[in-house]
Image (cartoon, grey):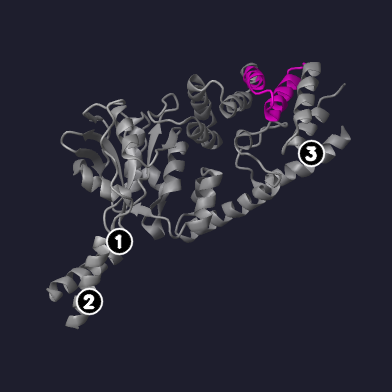
Amino acid sequence: MKKTSARIVPVALFSLALGFQTPALHAELVATPDVATQASADAERAKVQQFLEQANVKERLQAMGVDGIAATDRVAALDQQEIHALAQRIDSMPAGGNITTMEWILIILVAILVVIAL
Amino acid sequence: MRRLARWLSAAATLALAACAGLPPGEWGYPSTDPLPQRAERTDAPFHPQEVYQCGPAALATALGSAGIRRSPEELTNEVYIPARQGSLQPEMLAAVRRSGAVAYRLAAQPRALLKELAAGHPVVVLQNLRFDWAPQWHYAVAVGYDLPARQVVLRSGREKRLVMDLDDFDRSWAKSGRWAFVALPPERLPATAVEADYVAAAVALERVAPAAAERAYRSALGTWPNNLVARIGFGNTAYRRGELDAAEAAFRQAAADHPESGDAWNNLAQVLHERGQRTAAREAAKRAVAIGGPRLPAYRRTLEGIPGG
């Protein structure tokens, strides 16, 4: 019994440290996302990378004006692939919004130039 | 100065000419799989967009059509990024899940859009209303179409019923790679649902809304009863709610359908153990350990956790 807990404790700590995206089922049920991924032998390393990416995305969201608590919740709602995609290219990803002031200035500039040219 | 202006305008014209994203899509339909000539969800709610808030407005419309009332103001906190003055695609999908609905990405084809609309499922689309070199990204919700008139009907920005020419719409949509998704209650499969993609959408939902995911797994199993991930997911969500009966039945079924799945045997073993069926639990755990695979250490821990033997 003691041996078992000695093994489980580090695993549990590791899980906590990683903030596993799936709320850990107690005991040793295999969580659904793990069943779904064709896990490689590198599963542990992949989890560490996920954890780092998650922190990175949260940081970037905060840098872009999302407040801390909201950023945590928002990252928690993303799945692994989405986090990966954001970590890779959050800055170049299209942000559906509306026309920005800067863009208006550009458009008007181009329009003026076109009119002058004609 | 005049020469510069001329040069610039020439450059602009060139850029305009080169702005096509994907090639024009196929909006016709084979007679083998006919769609209605026209379809429209006239009852899809409309939320006039505030400045920069087309993402939250489009989400509120799509969720409202699925019977989930959420205001654009609430959704703004979940998707809007001040520095970008807009919302990113992954976060749009995440906000759907946080609302307890399934977010399902459509195949990048006009036919997928038409099929969902014909089924009465409004579709959130990402458009580029301007040029590739100076994009204006915009979320709108397609709610209907009229094939003979070659029109798409949208809730867009401040327009409650924007009717766009099919070709104009397709051009603006193609620039985003025809990115689109539906937000549906977990009981309802998308008209274009593909097994693996739908189950993946349900798995993504499990993390934030397990109760909704359980219903989505049930929908998936209704159509694809052999799906291992959906079956185990159903068992896991039932287990988490303390419904050990339902969890055991699901894991038993998973192990029967997929005797090569160590995960199924492992989860079955754990539930049996908790229900006091020690011998059966050990049997199941041994099967998992014998199968092995990347999660062998977890299977071993399950086996070690069951006393006796």
Q: Residue at x 44, y 32 (%)?
A: B101
Give the residues in magenta. B248-277
Q: Secondary structure at mark 1?
A: loop
Query: Which amino acid is tagged 1?
Result: Thr
Q: Residue at x 65, y 41 (%)?
A: A39
Tag 1 residue:
A100
Task: Please identify the quadrant where the N terminus of chain A is shown.
Answer: top right
CA separation in Å, label 1 and label 2: 26 Å
Tag 2 residue:
B7
Query: Is B79 situated above or below B303?
Result: below
| Quarter location, residue A113 | bottom left
Q: Are marks 1 and 2 in contact (CB under 8 Å)?
A: no
Q: Residues within 10 Å of mark 1 (few under 14, many from 20)?
A: some
Q: Secondary structure at mark 2?
A: helix
Task: State the image coordinates of residue A81 (x, y, percent, origin top left).
Answer: 53, 46
- Pointer 2 indicates a residue of which chain? B
Task: State the image coordinates of residue A27 (x, y, percent, origin top left).
Answer: 72, 31
Nearer-the-camera pick, B82 or A100: A100
